[in-house]
Image (cartoon, grey):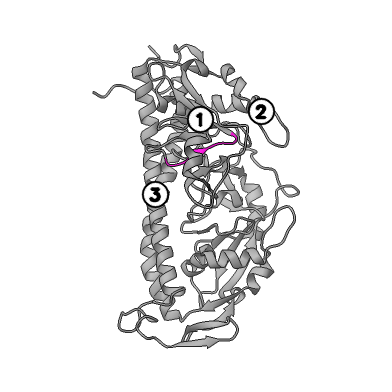
Amino acid sequence: MNEMKNAPLVPITDVLSFIVDNRGKTVPTAESGFPLIATNCVHNERLYPVFENIRYVSEYTLHNWFRAELKANDILFVNKGTPGRCCLVPDPVSFCAAQDMIGLRCDEQKVYYRYLLMVLRSTTTQKFISNYHVGIAIPHFKKEDLSKLLIPLPSMEYQKRIGDLYFDICEKEEHNNSICADLEAMAKLLYDYWFVQFDFPDENGKPYKSSGGKMVWNEELKREIPEGWEAGTFGDCIASINTGLNPRDNFKLNTGGTIRYLTVKNLTKEGTVDFSSCDCIDEEARAIVHRRSDIRIGDILFASIAPLGRCYVIKEDPKTWDINESVFSIRPNYKIATSNFLYMTFMSDSFVKKAEGSSTGSVFKGIRISELQDLKTIIPKKAVLDKFDDVVEKLFAAKSNAFNENMDLASLRDFLLPMLMNGQVKVCNME
């Protein structure tokens, strides 16, 4: 018997034991304390929320302000802005949530939480939610409409089989994301150690500045730098900067093509590319874009619109994707700089702060090519850059492996999900 095709359809509200709903008033925040997440932290491609632009609440607010607290394995469901996005609450609970989302708590006797997460992320459910959007400027899915959302309810045994399969794929992706974040953090630590604190290895392998390496005052940078290093601009370090095109007047999106068309939303703060919800163009459109973008291996993709600090070094042949006009493709001047050094510089807190100070624009604030080229920077000795490249390239190679595995897992997940939902794939009991 096909469990999914013969499963009864029931309102989602019939399989919930509780709904955590703290919407309706603004939670008082604090400078530090327990993390408070917003809807931007919830993604259908991540098992748990990501901590981006978070705020905090005090211990008192955490235990006294909220109508109810989230529990492990609740499903966080976005109502407003990006309705339908959902993810799990981890164990232990590491955040609180208030505005524009609710927590769905499963009745354990009726529905398996991993299965319900899978169903909510399915194309059928996401389309239903999209059709029930209200509001033009800010889409909103009303809590009252949850009762109209029908979900297939096979046996608990079968729910656990396919729910666990979906969860295992997502968990492996989450593990790889953690590896990527750890490797990125290690590279950032090395960058700070070498190019901010100036404790790169000297000729004897000892930390340069801490071991008494000579520092000289540089009038252009208004600071001391290692002897033999220079001051310059990013224009000195960059051979070329290209951008893509806006599709509005040049070509159409999503006409059946398979070339991924990257915008700033696809570049992450972890130094990876998020292909989820990525628009596509066809080969004809790509030929138009590529005449201007000309992206190649070794180029740095740079998000020019706020928030800055999102880049990606192209490590593989980018023949199946291209960029729009909000993404710079930066090619280093290899006589002076390297891809890895420029990438780490662009991702550094000091650069982001400096670049934000030079950003312009009323609607989309960002940095222009000329402004980026004019920003001052340190130019280290080439020998130091080459040593740095040798060290971080190993980290980035491991990061690239984890990232590529995640792309394969995401493809597998997206391929299996609709087939699991319509019963085309049957998951057998392996015990």
Task: Kindly indicate whether the residue at mark 2 contacts the one at mark 1 (C-beta within 8 angstroms).
Answer: no
SS of the residue at dot 1?
Answer: helix
Q: Which residue is mark 1?
A: 121
Q: In this rendered view, identify the residue nearer to me: 222 or 429.
A: 222
Query: Looking at the image, which residue is at 63% across and 63% down?
Result: 356
Q: Is residue 62 magenta?
A: no
Q: Is residue 157 left or right of residue 223?
A: left
On the rendered image, what quadrant is the C terminus found in? top left
- Which kind of residue does numbered mark 1 sit on? Arg
Mark positioned earlier in the residue sequence (3 or 1): 1
Element type at mark 2: loop
- CA separation in Å, label 3 and label 1: 22 Å
What residue is pinned by disc 2?
133
Residues shaded magenta: 94-100
* Percent x, y of residue 257: 60, 41
User: In the rendered view, would you say 393 is above or below 104?
Assistant: below
Which secondary structure, mark 3? helix
In this rendering, position of residue 291 left or right of residue 159: right
Which amino acid, by three-letter code, is at mark 2?
A: His
Callout 1 crowding tier (Cα within 10 Å): few <14, some 14–19, many ≥20 = some
Dot 3 corresponds to which residue? Answer: 178
Q: Residues within 10 Å of mark 3 (few under 14, many from 20)?
A: some
Asked whether 1 or 89 is in front, the reply is 89
Could you tell me which residue is drawn at 39 percent across and 77 percent down?
Answer: 199
Picture quadrant of residue 242:
bottom right
Q: Amino acid at mark 3?
A: Ser
